[in-house]
Image (cartoon, grey):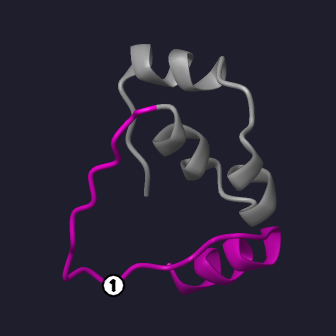
Amino acid sequence: MYGYRTDILHELNRLDPTPLEMAELLEQNRWLENGYSIKIIETSLDTFSIDTPEDMEKINQQI
């Protein structure tokens, strides 16, 4: 899950894609290559990856 400060989100939105981002299809590379940092926090909670509408449907059925 990502969390953003509003001002930083506006800044990130103005950045042009970088070659590494386009090669790896990871927008995080754009941020890192432009000097932004990403904070990662480990959790012991069960989490689910939702990448498609089908993933979302599966999760909704479990709730």
**37 falls in the magenta region:** yes
| Location of residue 53 with respect to 25 vertically, above or below | below
| Location of residue 31 with respect to 46 vertically, above or below | above
Q: Residue at x 51, y 32 (%)?
A: 34
Dividing the picture into quadrants, the one containing residue 60 is: bottom right
Q: Nearer the viewer, residue 58 or 51?
A: 51
Query: Which residue in the structure is indicated by mark 1?
Result: 46
Q: Residue 52: image x %, image y %?
A: 78, 70
Q: Residues within 10 Å of mark 1 (few under 14, many from 20)?
A: few
**60 falls in the magenta region:** yes
Tell me where the magenta segment starts and ends, as one range: 35-63
Q: Residue 53: image x %, image y %?
A: 80, 68
Q: Nearer the viewer, residue 9 or 45?
A: 9
| Location of residue 51 with respect to 55 vertically, above or below | above
Seen in the image, is 43 located left or right of residue 52? left
| Location of residue 60 with respect to 58 vertically, above or below | above
Assign the N terminus to one quadrant of the image: bottom left
Q: Residue at x 33, y 41 (%)?
A: 37
